[in-house]
Structure formats: C-alpha cells, structure tokens
C-alpha cells in the first residue's frame, strides 16, 4: 500500500510533540524535588556582650523653682512701679516704691526724741560732775576735821564734826542720784533710738525689692493704687507683682512604687521636651520619702537648669529614669527569645543545624534581653522566624544587619 507524503509529516510532528511534552514534565518533577530538598533560610544574629539598661519614662509639667506674690510690708500709695510682665529682674532690684506721708512725720518726731534724749544725757553728765565735785569737797572737809580731832582731841566742837559728816553723806547721796539720773537718761536715749530704728526699718519697706533673680509673671497694681499691708490676717491685701524663678525649674514625677528603690538623689536623667524637640539634662534633687496611698507613687523632684529661659513653666516633659543597668552582659535581640512555652528558649544554629536551648533571662530593654544562663557568647540565634523549625533541622543562615548587639 502506498503511504501519502502528508501522513508521514503528521506522524513525525506527533512523535516530536510527545517527546517534548515528556521532557518538560520530567524537568518540572526534578525541580520540585530539588526545591523540597533545599534547606530553609533563617535570619540569625550572634549573642554578644553589651551594656544593658532599663528605663521608665514619666511625664510631668515644668514648675518654677520658686514663685511668690510680692506683698507690701506697710500700707501706702504706689509712687512708681517700673517693672511689667515678662521683665527679668535681679535680686535686690527695685520693683515698686510706696508713698507714706505720715511716716515722714513719724521719722521727724523720732529724730527729735533722740536729740532730746541726747540733751538729757548731757545734762545728767553735768549734774553728776557737779555732785561729784560737791561730794569731793565735803568729804575732804570731813577728813581734815577728823585728822584734827585725832591730833588734838576737844579742839573742834562735836556739833561741827557732825555737820561735816552730814554734808559728806548728803553729797555722796547726790552723786548716787546723779548717776541714777544719767542711767535713766541713757535708757530713754536707747528707747528713742530703737523707735527711730523701727521707723527707719519701716521706711525702707516703702521700696519693694526682688528677693531673688526671676521673671515678673503678673502685675497687680499701677501707679497711685492704694496697697494694704500684706499681713497674714489681711487676706484681702493686694500684691504688687508675682515673681517666678525660672532659671531653675522643677519637675514633680509620680514614680511608681515598683521602682522607688531605684531612685537616687543626684542621679542624672534625660528630659525630653516634645514642644521644642530637644533633650535637656536634669538631676534628681529630692523625693518625698513617702508613697501616696491613692496612686501608689512617690513624688520625686527633678531640677533642670534653664539659664537662657528657653524652658517655660507649664511645658510638658518626658523624663527617663534609669531603673537598672548591667555592664558587659550577654544579650540577644528581643525577638530571638521564644516565650510560648513554659520557660523561655532560643533556637541556635551550629554548622547549619538547628538546636533548641532553654535559657534564663535577665535585664531587658526595648531592643535586647540579657541571657543569664543557657547560651554562650558568639552563638548564632534565630531571630523572629521560628515557625516550623525543629531540633536537628538543617537550615541556611542569613545574618541580620543591626541585630547583632
């Protein structure tokens, strides 16, 4: 039988297509098998030594180191008040001057009283000198008469002797009276001077000065205003200005009871001011030494120096308190620890083989955790991806940048 030419061509094509199809199927099967036999790739980091520390971040509001309402000690009219809100003042700088007309009269009267007392002292001195001179003459006369009587008894009548003796005693009493008068005059002079000093002290209070370096944050009075004396019994007395010391600020932090034992006076802390985008240095200055029952916290004050007054009272700040610190501790990345079981463990890789090791954890921060036991320095640990890994499984490692402590 004769075969047609086109039939031969078709047969060749069919055979070629079948062979091609069989070749492709075999290649796919080999690739799938190779993929199943390939080791999984896992990210690893090495356990290494590092300085670890744990912090607690607390938020507080800046407060002035000290702030007062400046009151007047004496009542009077405001003669001048040269400062206003926002002015920076130095200690001793004049804030206001009061006018008290009647105090000038009191000072004049006190000065006159002192002058009068000084004159009385001078008079008393003269009286004492005269009395002493009189007593000296009377005593000398009596002494001479006594000498004559001893040499020549009966020469001087007894009555004359008694009169001389009496004059001596009287002059002696006059001296004592003059001395007493002098002491009285001196005492009156001291009283007059004390009264004048009191009035002069009150008069100095007519000038109100800044008790410390600060900023005027409020002004209550104007020129001509009547100001009452700022005593504790007169709560309605109006202050002149409010003065705030802002070159040193306070932060009062509510430290939780769990970390109270870690707070130490003098410790340096970081103070982050979000509104300025800057971090300042502060110092733990004092704490309350008692825990509030309602919040279970202890008030702790941090002082922050503010010489250029960039920080303003009322700003919020975040303070990072150092709770604990371990130097040269063996650490691994935080996500290298598997905490799903009863105890923490890590997946290590040695010579491409996975091993599971139970570990004891120590200090922990936001990035790393200390391995107290169960791991050696330099061991590669699997980071993050541990699903499906088993003991003894072969893997291919890929070091993770930035994860090695």
Image (cartoon, rainbow, N blue to C red):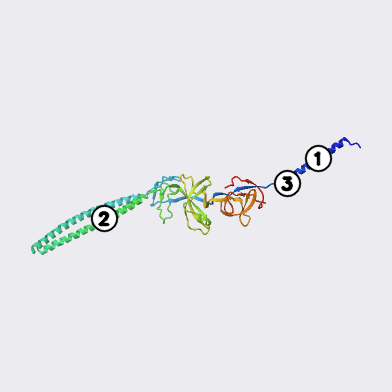
Mark nearer the N terminus (2 vs 3): 3
Nearer the camera: disc 2 or disc 1: 1
Q: Is mark 1 in CB contact (under 8 Å) with mark 3?
A: no
At mark 3, the secondary structure is helix
Mark nearer the N terminus (1 vs 3): 1
Nearer the camera: disc 2 or disc 3: 3
Viewer can see residue 197: yes
Residue in the image at 35% along x and 51% along y: 201
Instruction: Answer few, some or many: residues within 10 Å of disc 2's Cα (few below 14, many 20 plus, some between 14 and 19).
Output: some
Disc sitting over residue 207 in the figure: none
Q: Classify residue 195 as left or right of residue 324.
A: left
Against 188, is 213 above or below? Answer: above
Residue in the image at 28% along x and 52% along y: 114
The one of 200 and 254 positioned closer to us in this rendering? 254
Disc sitting over residue 33 in the figure: 3
Mark nearer the N terminus (2 vs 1): 1
- The residue wearing badge 2 is 186
At mark 1, the secondary structure is helix
């Amino acid at each position: 039988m004769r075969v047609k030419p086109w039939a031969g061509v078709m047969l060749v094509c069919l055979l070629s297509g079948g062979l091609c199809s069989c070749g492709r199927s075999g290649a796919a099967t080999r690739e799938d098998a190779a993929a199943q036999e390939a080791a999984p790739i896992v990210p690893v980091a090495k356990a290494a030594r590092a300085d670890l520390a744990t912090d607690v971040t607390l938020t507080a509001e800046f407060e002035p180191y000290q702030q007062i309402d400046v009151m007047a000690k004496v009542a009077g009219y405001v003669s001048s008040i040269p400062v206003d809100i926002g002015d920076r003042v130095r200690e001793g700088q004049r804030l206001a001057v009061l006018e008290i007309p009647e105090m000038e009269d009191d000072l004049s009267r006190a000065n006159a009283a002192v002058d009068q007392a000084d004159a009385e002292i001078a008079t008393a001195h003269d009286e004492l000198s005269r009395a002493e001179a009189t007593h000296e003459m009377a005593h000398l006369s009596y002494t001479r008469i006594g000498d004559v009587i001893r040499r020549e008894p009966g020469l001087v009548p007894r009555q004359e002797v008694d009169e001389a003796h009496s004059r001596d005693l009287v002059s002696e009493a006059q001296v004592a009276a003059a001395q007493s008068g002098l002491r009285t005059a001196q005492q009156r002079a001291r009283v007059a001077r004390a009264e004048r000093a009191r009035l002069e002290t009150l008069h100095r209070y007519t000038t109100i000065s800044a008790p410390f370096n600060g900023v005027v944050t409020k002004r209550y009075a104007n020129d001509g205003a009547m100001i009452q004396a700022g005593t504790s019994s007169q709560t309605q007395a109006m202050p002149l200005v409010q003065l705030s010391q802002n070159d040193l600020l306070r932060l009062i932090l509510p430290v939780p009871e769990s970390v109270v034992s870690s707070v130490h006076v003098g410790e340096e802390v970081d103070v982050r001011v979000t509104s300025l985008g800057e971090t300042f240095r502060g110092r733990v200055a004092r704490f309350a030494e008692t825990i509030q029952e309602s919040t279970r916290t202890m008030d702790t004050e941090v002082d922050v120096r503010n010489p250029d007054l960039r920080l303003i009272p009322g700003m919020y700040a975040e303070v990072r308190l150092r709770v604990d610190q371990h130097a040269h501790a063996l650490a691994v990345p935080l996500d290298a620890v598997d905490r799903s079981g009863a105890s923490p463990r890590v997946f290590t890789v040695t010579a491409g083989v996975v091993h599971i090791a139970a570990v004891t954890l120590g200090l922990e921060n936001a990035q790393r955790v200390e391995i107290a036991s169960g791991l050696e320095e330099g061991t590669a640990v699997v980071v993050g991806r541990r699903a499906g890994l088993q003991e003894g499984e072969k893997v291919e490692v890929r070091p993770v940048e930035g994860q090695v402590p």
